Image (tube, rainbow, N blue to C red):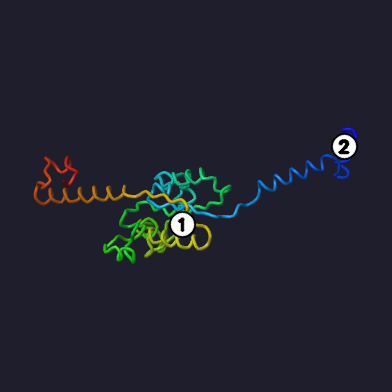
Amino acid sequence: MTATSDAKACKHWGSGPCASETAVSARFASSAGAVVPVTSSYLALGDSLAFGYSQQLFNENEAIGDPAIAFEHGYVNVYFTYQKPKLNGMQLQNNGCPGETTDSMIGNAGLAAAFGIPGEAPCKYHNTEAEEKGGPPGFKLPLHHTYNAPQSQLENALETLAVDKLTGKPVTLLTLNIGANDELHSIGKCKAEITEEWTKEGKSKYGGATPNNRSTCA
């Protein structure tokens, strides 16, 4: 059979050498498009860095409800991509909360009580910040993965570890960043203390010629 007759047979009957080629192509296409079942999870914990927050992105998206999908440019999403999740059957749960501190990550409910500490109200960004800034009652800035007060980020993480294990999608990868906001809070309290001392007494126990040239409480 000539090349011309092969082509005619393929076109008319779907037979000849093209039949096997088509079958092979179909198998490859089917394999490439197959959905790999989820068998493991990546759990990301942290503050604005994990969330992927930036003030510019917030300003650009605030008018349309600040959708969390706009903040998928942080290290968590980059690292998740490196895991080849579609090929390896991995899912992502990003618990990151902008402004989170060590205490607010623990929360002020059951886990704090277990640790014997007062803790801090969980994830202010999601639970109260919108209303505090004049948003409509009940409106909450969205997270990538929602957990509502009184549940804290760490409490939700413990729940996720248990549930994903039971459902055959155990957490095999976990990242955590926290602490930067703790330092910022400490600096803010220190500056407020120094300013109050200068206002009342004209000096501070921490020294300094003016309230503006002393910013550490040590």
Q: Nearer the viewer, residue 132 or 191?
A: 191
Q: Residue 143 placed where, x, y %?
A: 44, 55
Mark 1 crowd level (few <14, some 14–19, many ≥20, 10 Å Cα): some
Give the residue displayed 62% in from the left and 52% down from the top: 35
Say which element carries label 2.
Answer: helix
Label disc, if present, on residue 6 of the rendered structure: 2
Q: Nearer the viewer, residue 38 or 210?
A: 38
Label disc, if present, on residue 31 of the rendered structure: none
Disc 1 target residue: 145
Q: Residue 175 placed where, x, y %?
A: 41, 49
Q: Nearer the viewer, residue 24 or 177?
A: 24
Give the residue displayed 58% in from the left and 47% down from the top: 87
- Amino acid type at circle 2 is Asp
Mark 2 crowd level (few <14, some 14–19, many ≥20, 10 Å Cα): some
Residue 14 in the image: above or below residue 132: above
Q: Is residue 136 left or right of residue 197?
A: right
Sequence-wise, the earlier of marks 2 and 1 is 2
Figure quadrant of the N terminus: top right
Say which element carries label 1.
Answer: loop
Give the residue displayed 44% in from the left and 44% down from the top: 75
Q: Is residue 63 left or right of residue 179?
A: right
Q: Residue 206 placed where, x, y %?
A: 12, 46
- Amino acid type at circle 1 is His
Contact flag, marks 2 and 1 (Cβ < 8 Å): no
Give the residue displayed 43% in from the left and 61% down from the top: 147
The alpha-carbon separation of the residues under discs 2 and 1 comes to: 57 Å
Residue 95 falls in which quadrant of the image? Answer: bottom left
| Nearest to viewer (mark 2 / mark 1) | 2
Q: Nearer the viewer, residue 89 or 128?
A: 89
